Amino acid sequence: MTESKTVTKDPICGMTVDEATAIHVERDGETFYFCGDRCRQKFLSKSAGAKPESKSGGCCG
């Protein structure tokens, strides 16, 4: 049997992350996944109503 990975994009930097291993946060009933703690902290510092950034590729470094 093959394992299927579920990938999604980090809402801050746009990096593709594996939901099974990524840092995540729940907000308003939705789960958001991050490449690392820096992006998670940036997300948490924004107000709950703010739209995620629309960047693609690469980490925020």
Image: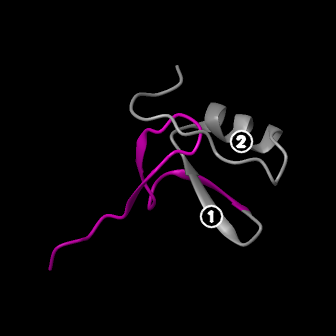
Nearest the viewer among 37 and 28 is 28
Indicate the secondary structure of the residue bearing disc 1. Answer: strand
Please report the residue visible at 39 percent of the width from the left and 32 percent of the height from the top: 57
Residue type of the residue flagged with mark 2: Phe
* Relative image position of residue 6 (x, y in whole percent): 36, 64
For residue 17, side relative to residue 46 (left or right): left
Does residue 28 lie above or below 19 as drawn? Answer: below
Does residue 20 lie above or below 2 as drawn? Answer: above
Q: Quadrant of residue 40?
A: top right
Does residue 52 lie above or below 13 as drawn? Answer: below
Q: Which residue is mark 2?
A: 43
Please report the residue visible at 26 percent of the width from the left and 70 percent of the height from the top: 4
Residue 20: assigned label: none
Magenta range is: 1-26
Identify the mark nearer the N-term, 2 or 1. Answer: 1
**Magenta-drawn stretch, dominant element (helix, strand or loop):** loop
Nearest the viewer among 35 and 15 is 15
Residue situated furthest right in the rendering? 47
* Relative image position of residue 55 (x, y in whole percent): 50, 34
Nearest the viewer among 21 and 42 is 42
Please check the rendered image and state whether residue 16 is part of the magenta-colored stretch, yes or no.
yes
